[in-house]
Image (cartoon, rainbow, N blue to C red):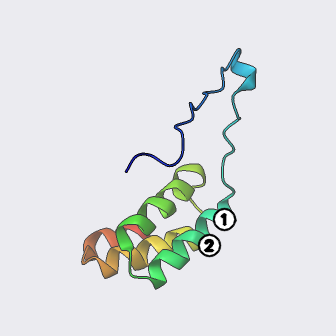
Amino acid sequence: MGRTRTKTKRTVPVVSAASDLPSKSIPSIPSLLDKAQELIMQCDYGLARMFVKRVLDREPTHADAREMMGVVLLETGEIDEARSVSD
C-alpha cells in the first residue's frame, strides 16, 4: 500500500519590507483587566498576576488593578506584599 495522495510543496510567503509585517497592537487596559478577572475566577493566579502587572506598569495608580493584585497576592499567600499594594 502506497501513498494515496501526492505530497504537495508548501510555499512560504516572502516578506519584502518591514512595512509588510503586521503591527503589534497594545491591548487596552480594560481588556487586560477583563482577562485578569477571568483568570482569577479560574484560579490561575500566576497568569492573572502577569496581566494585572501589565496594567500597573502602564498605570501604577489604577484602583481596580491594585485591588486585583491584592486579591492575587492574598490567594497565593503573599500577605505582606498584598498589604503593600494597598499603601
Secondary structure of the residue carrying numbered label 1: helix
Q: Answer with the quarter of the image where residue 11 lies.
A: top right
In the image as oriented, which residue stretches furthest toward the front? 1
Say which amino acid is labelled 2.
Answer: Asp
Q: Answer with the quarter of the image where residue 47 lies.
A: bottom left
Closest to the observer, 10 or 28: 10
**Residue found at x 69% / y 44%:** 25
Q: Are marks 2 and 1 in contact (CB under 8 Å)?
A: yes
Image quadrant for the C terminus?
Answer: bottom left
Rendered location of residue 80, percent (x, y) = 26, 72
**Residue found at x 33% / y 80%:** 74
Secondary structure of the residue carrying numbered label 2: helix
Where does label 1 land, which residue? 31
Asked whether residue 64 is in view, the answer is yes
Say which amino acid is labelled 1.
Answer: Ser
The dot on residue 5 is none
Rendered location of residue 75, percent (x, y) = 32, 81
In the image as oriented, which residue stretches furthest toward the bottom? 41
Mark 2 → mark 1, Cα distance in angstroms: 5 Å
**Residue found at x 66% / y 26%:** 13
Asked whether residue 87 is in view, the answer is no
Left or right relative to 50: residue 13: right
Rendered location of residue 46, percent (x, y) = 35, 67
Q: How many marks?
A: 2
Closest to the observer, 45 or 1: 1
Closest to the observer, 83 or 12: 12
Where does label 2 land, which residue? 34
Q: Badge 1 local density, few (<14 within 10 Å), some, or many (20+)? A: few
Left or right relative to 57: residue 22: right
In the image as oriented, which residue stretches furthest toward the top? 16
Q: Badge 2 local density, few (<14 within 10 Å), some, or many (20+)? A: some
